[in-house]
């Protein structure tokens, strides 16, 4: 079985690559910058230069591939949904022209809405396109990454987090390593067929207030979270360098899931993964 992995240096991809290697698979890593692949991995992987938004490059790189782990790459852009559309087209062409029979797609909670969730709308469009193909597809609908806390390190160090969400509203938080584990098991399991949705909800739903409490306890200093207006958050994104359309799309991921949204898949033994936020903080932030 020839398995390709996109964004191999990403939050999920870096773990997935090593899991496949440990399972005895020699994965094909598709990377815009192959020189950034860790030298220790080179004896155990194959690497191809391919930009996930360049269909010709993706088609050429995936010849002979049986299964692929696909991520729509989020990059700083004036037209984020157009970028997602180009990535979707690249995947569709690669699957069709190269006869790739199995796809595991890194999607997000909220993609089931199909419209009205900012950047997640781009993931929803990829889901719809994949479901229209005669191949086996699993969409991993992932919760909010623990690593998103690192997007504004300065604010975290200063002990002040901001959100547009209600502070006591619980939502799924998940460790990227747990997503990688689900992805690896799904890629290696040859029993499933058809179109599937597999939610990855993390160990428990957490509110932002609970997250701030865990950070305070584990970091040994007070961390507070403040709810701000949508306009204030949009200003923060623009001040951080985001183009206007991207700032809108990123904000939309929160505002689009804020009111009366319930994930399509319930929390269960199937959707629950083990790594707690407390354990992740101890490993990634305290040490």
Image: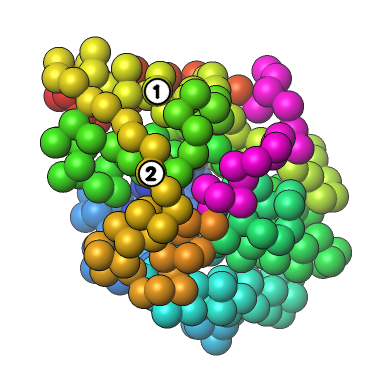
Nearer mark to the viewer, of 2 and 1: 2
Res 176 quadrant in image: top left
| Residue with the mark numbered 2 | 228
Q: Earlier in the sequence, mark 2 or mark 1?
A: 1
Judging from the image, the colouring scheme is rainbow
Residue at coordinates 24% horizontally, 30% vertically from top-left? 284
Percent x, y of residue 181:
52, 34
Q: Which residues are magenta?
A: 253-271
Q: Nearer the viewer, residue 49 or 9?
A: 9
Q: Nearer the viewer, residue 127 or 32?
A: 127
Regarding residue 51, the answer to whether it shows in the image is no
Residue at coordinates 59% horizontally, 42% vertically from top-left? 258
Percent x, y of residue 246:
44, 69
Categorize mark 2 by other alpha carbons within 10 Å: few (<14), some (14-19), many (20+): some
Asked if 53 appears above or below 257 in the picture, the reply is below
Q: As drawn, is 173 to the left or to the right of 93?
A: left
Res 100 quadrant in image: bottom right
Main secondary structure found in the magenta portion: loop
Regarding residue 223, the answer to whether it shows in the image is yes
Q: As drawn, is 263 to the left or to the right of 274?
A: right
Number of labels in the image equals: 2
Kind of element beneath mark 1: helix
Asked if 115 appears above or below 41 in the picture, the reply is below
Percent x, y of residue 260:
70, 37
Res 76 quadrant in image: bottom left
What label sits on residue 209 in the rendered view? 1
Residue at coordinates 37% horizontally, 53% vertically from top-left? 233
The quadrant of the image that shows the C terminus is top left
Is residue 259 shown in magenta?
Answer: yes
């Amino acid at each position: 079985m020839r398995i390709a992995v996109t964004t191999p240096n990403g939050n999920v991809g870096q773990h997935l690559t090593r899991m496949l290697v440990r399972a005895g698979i020699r994965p094909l890593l598709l990377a815009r910058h192959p020189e950034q692949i860790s030298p220790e991995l080179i004896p155990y992987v194959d690497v191809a230069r391919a930009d996930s938004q360049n269909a010709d490059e993706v088609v050429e790189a995936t010849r002979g591939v049986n299964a692929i782990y696909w991520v729509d790459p989020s990059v700083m852009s004036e037209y984020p949904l157009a970028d997602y559309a180009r990535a979707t087209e690249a995947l569709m062409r690669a699957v069709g022209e190269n006869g790739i029979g199995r796809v595991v797609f890194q999607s997000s909670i909220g993609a089931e809405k199909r419209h009205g969730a900012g950047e997640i709308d781009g993931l929803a469009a990829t889901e719809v396109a994949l479901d229209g193909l005669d191949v086996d597809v699993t969409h991993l609908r992932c919760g909010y990454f623990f690593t998103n806390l690192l997007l504004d390190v300065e604010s975290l160090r200063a002990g002040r987090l901001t959100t547009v969400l209600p502070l006591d509203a619980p939502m799924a938080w998940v460790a990227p390593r747990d997503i990688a584990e689900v992805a690896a098991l799904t890629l290696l399991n040859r029993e499933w067929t058809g179109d599937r949705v597999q939610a990855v909800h993390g160990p428990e739903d957490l509110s932002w207030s609970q997250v701030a409490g865990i950070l305070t306890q584990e970091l040994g200093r007070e961390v507070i979270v403040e709810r701000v207006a949508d306009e204030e958050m949009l200003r923060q994104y623009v001040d951080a360098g985001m183009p206007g359309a991207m700032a809108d799309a990123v904000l939309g991921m929160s505002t689009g899931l804020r009111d009366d949204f319930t994930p399509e898949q319930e929390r269960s033994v199937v959707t629950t993964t083990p790594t707690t936020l407390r354990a992740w903080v101890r490993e990634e932030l305290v040490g």
